[in-house]
Image (tube, helix red, strand yellow):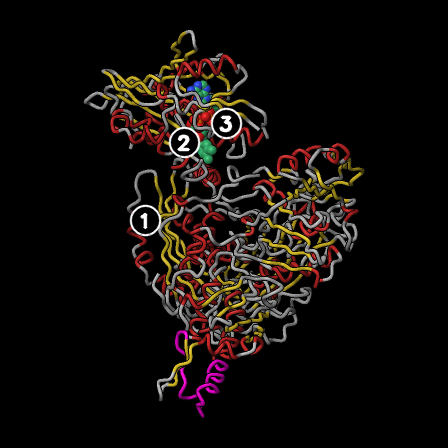
Amino acid sequence: MKSFIPEIGCSIPRADGEAKVSGEEKYATDHYGDGLLWAGVRRAGIPHGRIRGLDAGQAKNLPGVIAILTGRDVPGTNRQGIVHKDQPVLCTDKIRHCGDPVALVLAEDRTVLAQALALITVDIEPLPGIFSIDDALRPDAPLVHEEHSGSNVLLAATVDKGNAEEAFSECDVILEETFTVPSVAHAFLETENGIAWQEPDGKIVLVVSTQAPFRDRFEISHALGIPMDRLRIIGPYLGGGFGGKDGATVQCLLVLAAIHAGGRRVKMWWSREESMAAGFKRHAVRMEYRLGAGSDGTLHALKCRLYYDTGAYAHLGGEVMALGMEHASGPYRIPHTLIEGWCVYTNNPVAGAMRGFGVAQVSFAFEGMMDRLAEKLRMDPLDLRMKNALQRGDKNGAGVTMTHSTGIVSCLEAVGSHPLWKGKEQWMAEAPPFKKRGVGVAAVFNAMGYGRGLPDSAIAKVELTAEGKIRVYCGVSDMGQGNATAFFQIAGGVLGQENDAIELVQPDTARTLPSGSASAGRTTYTYGNALIQAAEELRRRIIGRAALMILADTVDELELLPGRVKHLKSGREIPLNILASVMPPEDRICISQFIMPVARDGLETGKAFFIGFPHLLFSYAAHLAAVEMDELTGTLEVKAYLAATDAGRVLNPQSYEQQVHGAIAQGIGYALCEEIKLEEGRILTPDLATFIIPGAMDIPDMMSISVETCETSGPYGMKGAGEVGINGPLPAIAGALAQACGIRVKTAPLTAERILEAMVEQQTACERKPS
Amino acid sequence: MNRVLLPKNLPELWSFLENEPEARVYAGGTDLLVQMRARCADNLVLICLERIAELTGIREDEDGFWIGACTTFRHLLNHPRIREQIPVLAKALSTLGSPPIRNMATIGGNICTASPAGDTLPPLYVLDADLILSTQSGERVVPLSGFITAPGKTQLERGEVLTQIRIKKPEGYRVQHFEKVGQRKALACAIASMAALVKTSPAGVIESARIAWGSVGPTVVVSPDAEAALTGKTLSPAVLEAAADLAGKAMAPIDDIRATAVYRRRVAANLLLRIGT
Ligand SMILES: Cc1cc2nc3c(=O)[nH]c(=O)nc-3n(C[C@H](O)[C@H](O)[C@H](O)COP(=O)(O)OP(=O)(O)OC[C@H]3O[C@@H](n4cnc5c(N)ncnc54)[C@H](O)[C@@H]3O)c2cc1C
């Protein structure tokens, strides 16, 4: 490849592309080693119960079994969890979902491991289970966590402003609807895995597929009682994460295994089925909406009740719900809102973070309400949205003043002027036999960062190496979304160096500095801001130290060029390797921290949230879906898709488009087919043959328009682009379906069966109607 | 550890089968290996049929085709005469699995797996395919329609191997239609499928109709009543709807993770309306 200076705004090739394609780049799964041991978990297989006994006698005697560990072997608190520490590493007494771990086995190879796991018998006394939101909320419901405040409600909260109850009496139209969305899995290619070992000095090293290496260290330390300075976490590039690796999966189990492995390396790698059973999921949610507006379509009052099923453990349930509640009123100006939420424990699989964190769910509801309102008022659905869209200076539904870039109107305008929207009547009229066509739109948004209560911080470290190259120590993971490439561009742009002179170090608690999780659309924003500061400082330093060597009396005549500093007046040059050789190591490293700004409004609402409420910065998008529905089968096909996105300035058009496309494709899966089906807490869709994600043939050509606002607080004006796109497809497609055939589905996903059934109902209703 | 034997010709296959009577034969392995993983099967003897030249390939004669049981779907789809003469089969193959699956999977494997959702089965039913079942000592010809007795169950006897599939050209059947309804466009197990052959007179009167449905019963479902209701009529919506109603009565679908029986029956019958377009 030709050398180039990776600059901001250009579609430079991915920094990790070549190494990944050639196989040189190692994911966590690619790590093995001599004398490798395999670790695996015996899972309960029962949704709710009490452990009466565990017999590992036969398994222990199997040749090749190194150790069998239970909850009693866990040295620390045996509790993990990001906010609430309620999840045991290994269960000692109570089972709360089928995937709960009861024993950890270390074996010489995978065959012995599987045999040993099968030989362990667990005696569990079944308890009545909680398998739905309504079950959980019954006053006499058995408790999933007896120690938790006497109910199954993990968190109940209210977000309000104005006086919604009274405001409904001032509305010309009031609409009500209840929506439900199922739990879904991230279905990343690389399932949860890692490798760990104990060094001769007792320190433990863990290489793991993780979105949050620094938080992992904290969680392991707490759960296993190991001081943080005895733990080193290395987080290579991930083969997908989408939120499912934000939190402990294999981490504590592997470190526990390493303690019993006598210095040998131990590997754990969940099968797809285990990932389904034990991995985190997106929350299933029920959303009861009441929306009031004037006859001209001006939104006036919103009341909603949201119920999140967080499964057996809290994980980030409360925070996911908080973000859902904050977005429950859409990217609209509504003077009166009352949003109530309940996040409940059940004996279902554990729900947690997933791209669109609580927001993908409510987007279906608030946009569904907007479509219903447009229909009721016979208004154009795009005009209705435009009329109510947030503008800078407005207060959003949670009462936060929009003081930063707010591009939703521009996004809607971009969709409105697109041929797909303007030509929709004709396109719909040209539907082939047995097909009905429709075009739908959705306006969505997604907050960035952790919100109040927790510093959204990153610490960048950049080094002029002894060889005169630039090394960036990335403290935040790249799960495929491309932030490492953005860091490459930032370092290249600020320091003017060529691609082969820039090296990226992926997260490693021993080398990089705490920079938070790869999540919340914050990764490039927060670390990027820190990196700009650090790289600028390094640039000043390089020039300043070169001045000493060149005997320049002012730095103004010096320029940092690829591989060298040049004194422009005299033409003298100092190669960076020579310069580096006279700089002591500590002088060659620059470190800088950045903390995301926070909302300043003094809100009197959302008091129940410990952290994660409210937010200041949002990305916006308007989506258009053109669909064709088959009247004979109910099958819905997305024929064309358009996304207009405001994620601030674009640092790399290619990475940006990939994020938009990926989010749409994943969102189409959420809209059309993805669903974790459960029966009494057991997963009926345990693999990718039954948990249906879309394939290439289900995804149409996708068009991405960037509505570039400038987010002045962001690095080069950018905002997060990773999440907002997943919120649009479900509502846009549901709207398009209604346009096509008048059917408004309230339950996702919009499967052919649901649609055909609704059509039959519609027909019978028509036939029954007296003419 | 499983042991895999790789016979290179039929005589070698017969001797392997004689020495290892418990052995399982397989061709592409796209069904067998998936089942073995699910059952954690170990210590089996497997006989792979894919290198036996006599079992792969397509031969055309005057009135039809001889297809080796181990011919892959890719091979069949690449064959211009198959695409031209029996599009009902080619259409089914093009919806089966994904490109990698079609490269591995074989027509004989699809038949012997005897899944209610096997995508080649409805077309092979309407084509009246015959199967050649062979052992060391000889062979017999059985019609496909009686071969599959229940899900996963066939008339194959111990030591017997499916060697050839015989398909006669459907002369005069201008309408050759296949459609599958799945949960997504590719890599989808049929919720319902339908293959249809219709022969019409120059005036548009149906002279003969052969229709078969997949995934709506323990094996492929046919409906002589529906076929009779079409014969002598034209392909009008009213005629097709009446036949679809009759067809629905012949089906005995089940509820499973992919769909309910109600939907299966409804959608399978509806598919018949498509042949009018
Ligand atoms: C990801 C995936 C997607 C799939 N999608 C589809 C689909 O869309 N539609 C569909 O119909 N199927 C599908 N299948 C199932 C499978 O690919 C087909 O049934 C295929 O035709 C099987 O052929 P094979 O050669 O691989 O069979 P094998 O796995 O080799 O054999 C299957 C069975 O038949 C027996 N057998 C094979 N050949 C012979 C023979 N000559 N004589 C006697 N017995 C024999 C074997 O003993 C075994 O019991 C899919 C499978 C996978 C893994």
Cβ atoms under marks 1 and 3 closer than 8 Å? no
Q: Secondary structure at mark 1?
A: helix
Q: Relative to A264, is A557 on the left or the right?
A: left
- Chain ID for label 3? B
Label 3 SS? helix
Residue indicated by mark 1 = A428
Q: Amino acid at mark 2?
A: Met
Q: Secondary structure at mark 2?
A: helix
Q: What's drawn in magenta, residue-wise?
A: A540-563
* Residue at left offset 52%, top offset 77%: A533
Give the chain letter at badge 2: B
Q: Amino acid at mark 1?
A: Met
Foreground: disc 1 or disc 3: 3
| B181 is higher (above) or lower (below) than B196 | below
Residue farthest bottom in this picture? A553
Q: Which mark is residue B32?
A: 3
Q: Is residue A276 left or right of residue A91?
A: left
The location of residue B219, given as percent across then percent down, is: 46, 21
Say if residue A744 shows up in the picture.
yes
- Residue A301 higher or lower than A149, as above or below: below
Mark 3: C-beta under 8 Å from nearest atom of ligand 1 = yes
Residue B107 is drawn in which quadrant?
A: top left
